Amino acid sequence: MKDIKKLLGYRDSIKVVDATLRDGGLVNDFYFSDEFVKNLYKANIKAGVDYMEFGYRASKAVFDETKFGKWKFCSDDHIREIVGDNDTDLKLAIMADIGRHNKDDFDQKVNSPVDLVRVAAYIHQMPEAIDMIEDAAKKGYMTSCNIMAISNAQKEDISVALDMLAQTPVDVLYIVDSFGSIYPEQMNRIADLFLEFAAKSGKKVGIHAHDNQKLAFANTIEACGDGVDWLDATYLSMGRGAGNCAMELLLGFLKNPKYNVYPVFKFIEEHMIPLKEEGIKWGYDLQYLLTGLYNQHPRTAIQYTKDERSDITEFFKEIIN
């Protein structure tokens, strides 16, 4: 029975993380209404989701506050306006993006509704990421390190980064397929590498996948089957460019009865579909497929979308050149 449960994705150690506000905020510059955020928070509670990521805590010295919604900066006060004392089982997360944050903006955990600080960094930023991880851990937060653009990194460099992180108080080591370029057989090898370092140092491993090649769900369940416990997803796949692993797919796959997919569908019907109808664009399309195929940052495909271009073959030539 244990083996059957594992095959079906049933493990008590699995944690599902909703990244809709944070990754989805990259689509609409974080202009979500309080009603939207409150209802997403309630949907996550009803669905049994383990963590809800509220957004970035970006530095106002780096970003113009007038050009973004408040979840780009995600203050403790803004979170409390939504959750109050958060007397629920749902844990709260925010992201610190290395080079775009100020660690002095993070209060002591005892004074904050936030439980988890997710530190996003490229491999060459590991020293700064470790500084942030150590600061957040010292203040009492759980931490993860989301190693971005893993598809562009060499195994030796990944190993060095993981070895550095293994010596820190970080709780979760995250595989991030930033460009949506990784295939499941590659994910298997990457997950094994992360799990090897995690086992030596008592860490957990997570996955954050993008859907450029319609493989975000496939890569997530591949990683889950390999032993990765922390699984990111977003409602209706909302996220930068092609979006992420769909929450409705992931909870449908996981067989733990603590998860309930019905509140996800209800929230999608009442709030996500109206966002689409307002003209906010995200999700798989040919321009995102191309950047995924050629292992490139989707910024060019995002601009293609904003410019409302339809000359996909010309864009193909631009990509390969």
Image (tube, rainbow, N blue to C red):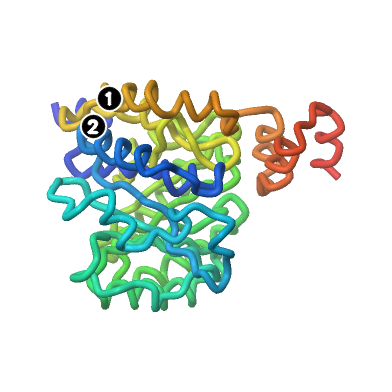
**In the displayed structure image, the side of residue 179 where residue 171 appears, left or right:** left
Identify whether 92 is placed above or below 143: above
Residue at 59% of width from left, 56% of height from top? Answer: 67
Identify whether 107 is placed above or below 41: below
Label 2 residue SS: helix
Q: How far across and down, in percent of the image, does residue 238 sit?
A: 48, 35
Residue at 21% of width from left, 31% of height from top? Answer: 259
Identify whether 122 is placed above or below 71: below
Instruction: Identify the mark nearer the N-term, 1 or 2.
Output: 2
Q: Which amino acid does label 2 sit on?
A: Ala
- Seen from the viewer's position, the closer of residues 159 and 242 is 242
State the residue position of label 1: 261
Cβ atoms under marks 1 and 2 closer than 8 Å: yes
Residue at 32% of width from left, 67% of height from top? Answer: 170
Alpha-carbon neighbours of circle 1 within 10 Å: few (<14), some, or many (≥20)? Answer: many
Residue at 66% of width from left, 35% of height from top? Answer: 288
Q: How far across and down, in percent of the image, does residue 56 sit?
A: 44, 58
Label 1 residue SS: loop
Checking the image for residue 47, the label placed there is 2
Q: How far across and down, in percent of the image, does residue 264 sit?
A: 31, 27
Q: Is residue 12 visible?
A: yes
Give the quarter of the figure containing the N terminus. Answer: top left
